């Protein structure tokens, strides 16, 4: 059994701390980012982790290949099932905390469990008393590195417990989220052409819904209007370009205009408001 804890001050570093996941983070509220990750690895087949994020973060992610993940969101005390097909994007609340158990393909095969058989419940919020109690126990187990449990028993017990929580949490039918579908169509379209300076009506056409519905469903799912989300996204992309630029290879003005910020003063003000520093400071560190 191995355990480690990591504290980060950079979104890219937080993303790299879980290399088997396909994921991408973007900052969605003002302040300096601080992330914490506590990981417990059991017998090379099970990974338990706790992630904390101090500000609102947009997460785009898919689980490791072949794995089945039981994710416990402490914001709504719900269980979410994830696998390699659960490509998802959402925006966390501030001071977010998530607990998750990741079972690899080998362990699942040993127990005759195929993640595809649970596909209809993928990313559906499954709330129950059992999910809330188990996530509390999971946090204590993680902090005590498994307590009295050993590698030989912890993996099997965790799988049995997670399946029991799942069975106790399943509704009769998988819930549907029209907001998620609308938002994902927009995010997919923007990801396909990230530098396009799109307007809200154009986003509505891409999503195939009226503008009023887009604005209502986008705000319900993300807490932001489509225009706010686009602006925050472009600020994050500008920050990544500034962070990764070789010395003398670019200027703040060039990066700003590449991401459709034509007024450099307003760009610098918005940038500092979100990230707590001027774009020139970010570029200087790069």
Image (cartoon, rainbow, N blue to C red):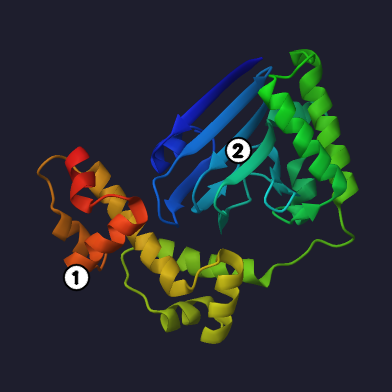
Q: Are marks 2 and 1 in contact (CB under 8 Å)?
A: no
In three-dimensional space, the C-alpha distance between marks 2 and 1, rounded to whole angstroms, equals 43 Å
Q: Earlier in the sequence, mark 2 or mark 1?
A: 2
Query: In the rendered image, is residue 286 in sight?
Result: no
The residue under label 1 is 263
Name the image quarter holding the C terminus. top left
Vertical placement of residue 108 versus 235, above or below: above
Q: Quadrant of residue 39?
A: top right
Other-residue count near label 2 (Cα within 10 Å), few / some / many at <14 / 14–19 / ≥20: some
Q: Is residue 188 left or right of residue 134?
A: left
Residue position for label 2: 65
Judge left or right: residue 117 versus residue 236: right
> Residue 40, position in %: x, y?
64, 23
Q: Is residue 134 left or right of residue 194?
A: right
- The local secondary structure at tag 1 comes to loop
**Residue under the point 81% across and 24% down:** 156
Residue at the left extreme of this rendering: 248
- Image position of 171 with respect to 131: above or below: below
* SS for dot 2: loop
Q: Quadrant of the N terminus?
A: top right
Pick the front one: 77 or 103: 77
Q: Which dot, 2 or 1, sits closer to the camera?
A: 1
Where is residue 31 shown, x and y percent of the image? 40, 50
In the image, what residue occupies the spot 45% across and 40% down?
34
Q: Residue at x 65, y 37 (%)?
A: 66
Q: Residue 273 location in percent, x, y?
A: 33, 58
């Amino acid at each position: 059994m191995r355990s480690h804890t990591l504290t980060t001050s950079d979104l890219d570093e937080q993303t790299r701390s879980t290399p088997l996941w396909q994921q991408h983070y973007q900052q969605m509220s003002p302040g300096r980012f601080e992330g914490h990750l506590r990981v417990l690895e059991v017998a090379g087949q099970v990974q338990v982790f706790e992630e904390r994020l101090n500000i609102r973060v947009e997460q785009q992610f898919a689980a490791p290949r072949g794995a089945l993940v039981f994710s416990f969101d402490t914001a709504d005390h719900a269980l979410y099932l994830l696998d390699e097909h659960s490509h998802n994007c959402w925006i966390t609340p501030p001071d977010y905390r998530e607990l998750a158990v990741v079972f690899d393909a080998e362990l699942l095969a040993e127990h005759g469990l195929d993640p595809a058989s649970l596909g209809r419940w993928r990313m559906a919020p499954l709330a129950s008393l059992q999910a809330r109690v188990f996530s509390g126990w999971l946090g204590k187990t993680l902090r005590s590195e498994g307590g009295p449990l050993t590698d030989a028993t912890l993996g099997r017990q965790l799988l049995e417990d997670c399946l029991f929580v799942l069975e106790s949490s399943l509704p009769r039918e998988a819930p549907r989220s029209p907001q998620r579908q609308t938002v994902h169509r927009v995010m997919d379209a923007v990801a396909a052409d990230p530098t396009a300076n799109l307007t809200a009506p154009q986003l509505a056409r891409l999503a195939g819904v009226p503008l009023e519905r887009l604005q209502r469903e986008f705000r319900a799912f993300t807490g932001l209007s489509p225009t706010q989300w686009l602006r925050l996204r472009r600020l994050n992309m500008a920050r990544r370009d500034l962070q990764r630029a070789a010395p003398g290879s670019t200027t703040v003005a060039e990066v700003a205009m590449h991401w459709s910020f034509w007024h450099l003063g307003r760009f610098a003000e918005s940038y500092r408001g979100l990230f707590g520093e001027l774009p020139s400071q970010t570029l200087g560190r790069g």
